[in-house]
Image (cartoon, helix red, strand yellow):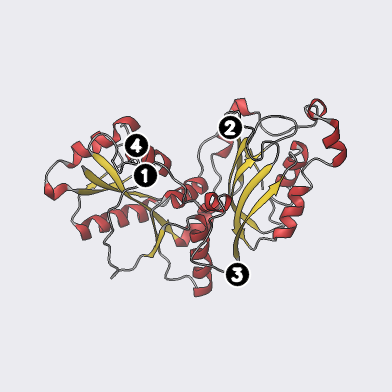
Amino acid sequence: MVSIVAVVGVCAQERRGYARRLAAANRWPVVEALRSVPAGRLAETLATAIGNGPQCEAAVFDAAGRWDAVELIGALAGDEADGHGAAGGARLAQLVAVVDVAHFFDDLADDDGAEEGASTAAERLVHGIEFASTVVLVNWEPLPTPDLSTLMALVNHLAPRARLRLDQPAANLELELGSVGREQDGAGWMRLINRDFVPYMTDSRVSGFVYEQMRPFHAGRLAEALDGDIGHGRFGRLVRSAGFCSLASRPGILAQWEQVGGVIGLEPLPATGDGGMLAIGQELAVVGLDLDRDGLTSALDACALTDRELAEGPLAWMAYPDPLPRWASGARAEHG
């Protein structure tokens, strides 16, 4: 079984450079993106490309822009219950996210492709951090200490269980080869919702909290708020929010809320039959910079149904204005 150290990152030059230095320091071979390989054959193809023998017990896989963190976990991660790796002779031992500090906030604001339904640089950046077992910050030296502290705290809030490293010329590039499992609950938003959020790095500008509201949102007011005060940063910079919500005009359906930067996706969840904890309400984990928690909470509360609207019932709700993209289209709403 070959241990794979997969390296992801939106900045190609920095990702590629770190992958090669990591491989050289540990005397591991490097495998490139394998762009034409289907996900179901990735483990087998990697094992074949690397070869067998004691000298090839581990390798670095430069995932490039072809493979994102979710795909790598699906293709290479093992089952945490039995500790086995993926079928095909290769297992995911580390998922390393390389973050270019010099372009971090530019990448976080890059929403190109959202209107066409493509993943954005901001989404790839945040998802890479959230699913990583190790996050490496490169090009951090010019940043003033207070700004570096803020950025490190933000990364830690996005992935509180990931190991955070500052890349330095003389740094030890050894990595412990563990086992990345398919069951992932290390993202900050998941830890917040599970009430198990304990980041080890803090900063006065960085915060996270859970927003709860038992009443469904009025889709028209929600869209207006996202395109207005919330999207324009009146309550601070909303970096990441995720969780569950419901829209009054689409009654009986619990939706997954996914927001990174200026893009918010709402996708219906399969019915479970048990009603769900908040089947007609909201439970959103929020992480951001300079957040006005009270102001943001009030703004979201104003999007929920009023007493009068709630009393009108689902038949009336379905006639309310709903400018958000229809779920069947697969489109996503973009704000700010």
Disc 4 secondary structure class: helix
Q: Amino acid at mark 4?
A: Ala
* Residue depicted at x 67% and y 48%: 336
Closer to us: mark 2 or mark 3? Answer: 2
Earlier in the chain: of badge 1 and badge 3, it is: 1
Closer to us: mark 2 or mark 4? Answer: 2
The residues bearing labels 2 and 4 have C-alpha atoms spaced at a distance of 23 Å
* Quadrant of the drawing holding the N terminus: top left
Earlier in the chain: of badge 2 and badge 3, it is: 3
Earlier in the chain: of badge 3 and badge 4, it is: 4
User: What residue is pinned by disc 3?
Assistant: 204
Give the percent coordinates (x, y) of residue 56: 16, 47
Please determine whether, in this image, residue 114 is positioned above or below residue 108.
above
Q: Say whether residue 247 is visible.
A: yes
Please determine whether, in this image, residue 168 is positioned above or below residue 264.
below
Earlier in the chain: of badge 1 and badge 4, it is: 4
The residues bearing labels 3 and 4 have C-alpha atoms spaced at a distance of 39 Å
Q: Which mark is residue 75?
A: 4
Residue 9 vs residue 228: left or right? Answer: left
Disc 2 secondary structure class: loop
Give the percent coordinates (x, y) of residue 83: 30, 44
Give the quarter of the image for residue 112: top right
Disc 1 secondary structure class: loop
* Residue lying furthest right: 308
* 294 and 224: which is toward the camera: 294
User: What residue is pinned by disc 1?
Assistant: 181
Disc 3 secondary structure class: loop
The residues bearing labels 2 and 3 have C-alpha atoms spaced at a distance of 35 Å
Rate crowding at label 3 as few (under 14), some (14 to 19) or many (20 or more) other CA atoms within 10 Å: few
User: What residue is pinned by disc 2?
Assistant: 269
